[in-house]
Image (cartoon, rainbow, N blue to C red):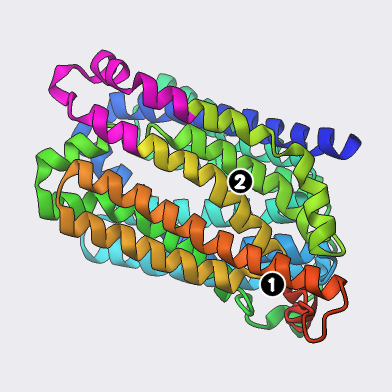
Amino acid sequence: MTRRRGLAAQTVVLIVAGAGSQALYVVLVALVAGRAGPAAFGMAAGAMGVGGTLVGVVDYGFNAFSVRELAAGRISRQIYWNRLRVLFAVTIGVALVIVITGVAIGRSDLGLMAALVLLSRTAVNGVAVPLRAARRVVKVAVVFLLERLAALTLAMALLATSTVSAVTVLWWALAAGGLVAVTTGVFVGDPPRPRWMRTGLADPWRATGGYGRFSLAVSATSLDVTLLAATGGSTQAGIYSAVSRWTQPVQFFAQAYSSAAAPAIAQASSSRAAWDAVRRSLWLLGGAVVSCAALVALAPAAVSLVLGDTYRQSAGVLTVLAIGAAVVVVNQPLATFLQSRGHEKVVGTCTVGTVALQLAGVWLTAGARGAAWAYGVAQLALTALLGVYALRLVRRQRRAADGAPGAGVPEPALADVRGAGR
């Protein structure tokens, strides 16, 4: 009972913190966008998007892999912090290239914006890893909320008292927020005293390939609107993109649950023990599925009320997307379970394949409804692939428990990556 309350409470904390963080960010963006104007803010937003994309590229599964290995005790905090320093040194190099490129093309402000986003997100995510691995979700929430709160506070002060441009205020605010969050994360995380080790200078991405392929594939799904605009035209892209993010709150629920459950799954002595650690709290995901059902039922009225009759075709798109989001509520925790038990290569390969299927569907159908169906079919395919793989593991482990010869299933998280943490 205590375990169930613990995981449920952690999930709720992450959901509340995530919602609060997003709300603060929305206010910050609204203030800056209103002062800067569409053209200037559009360019700044594009630069921020580039920086955000590069965060995932540079990370390449490092954070998720490190959470698992720290939670399971296969790497020490000393090793982690040394690897993070190497990763951040590489990030600084990439940021310098971005700044130089911005200067070369005459847009130093945009280059600086992208570089700041890359540096701040990498640093903040990095200092949060040990806290996530230790299941200190309140401290994780404090780190991310303080980042947004510090950025918003500085932006409001500068916009009210200074004459600098709104875009300049934005990158100052982002830098300040990142600095506050990193300082807080280091303070509450109590890292070991800096001590450069031979292992610390090793490749930070060693053994992160499965997680890396998974994260890059997930990032690639953001190309759906771009592909649809190229093949179906701006009208179809507008119909689709107008509602394509409406299901994000539901997906965020599944992400919060997976983030809270991953360390507990990695710490378990076996997959069966890991299942026992999380199964009693799976009822939390029912709320997300119910939300998807409500969205399906209310799609026509909601689209008409929020967007007007011009976007009436978006109602059908939203219905399909909501069904797909309900499937995500199932496959994301399943993917997290398999990754945390050492099967991240299989999850990464399956995700790459299904994302390719989705993007190919968007390209071939060249319509808003077709893009929504491509998303739904891809999620169903991913669920089926991961489900079949998980069932095979369960059957093999049951045969092993019954003493069938050659039926044993090694625990990859215990057997294969132990050497990677040294």
Where, by quadrant of the figure, is residue 395 drawn? bottom right
Q: Position of residue 249 (x, y in %)?
A: 49, 32
- In this picture, residue 405 sits left or right of residue 323: right
For the residues bearing labels 1 and 2, Cβ distance under 8 angstroms: no
Residue 112 appears in the figure: no
Looking at this view, is 218 or 384 the one in front? 384
Q: Position of residue 327 (x, y in %)?
A: 48, 44
**Residue 162 image label:** none
Q: Quadrant of the C terminus?
A: bottom right
Percent coordinates x, y for residue 215 in the rendering: 50, 61
Give residue 25's position: percent from left, percent from top: 47, 31
Q: Is residue 304 magenta?
A: yes
Please name the residue shown 33% across and 57% down the image: 111
Query: Given the image, on which type of amino acid does mark 2 rest?
Result: Leu
Q: Which residue corresponds to mark 1? A: 83
How many numbered marks are there? 2
Which secondary structure, mark 1?
helix
- Asked whether, in this view, residue 395 is left or right of residue 403, the answer is left
Mark 1 Cα-neighbour bin, 10 Å: few <14, some 14–19, many ≥20: many
Residue at figure coordinates x 76%, y 77% from the top left: 409
Task: Name the residue tied to disc 2.
Answer: 179
Residue count near mark 2 (Cα–Cα under 10 Å), binned few <14, some 14–19, many ≥20: some
Q: Nearer the viewer, mark 1 or mark 2?
A: 1
Sequence-first disc among 1 and 2: 1
Q: Which residues are magenta?
A: 292-320
| Secondary structure predominantly adopted by residues drawn in magenta | helix
Q: For the point 83% across and 32% down, which residue is it?
A: 5
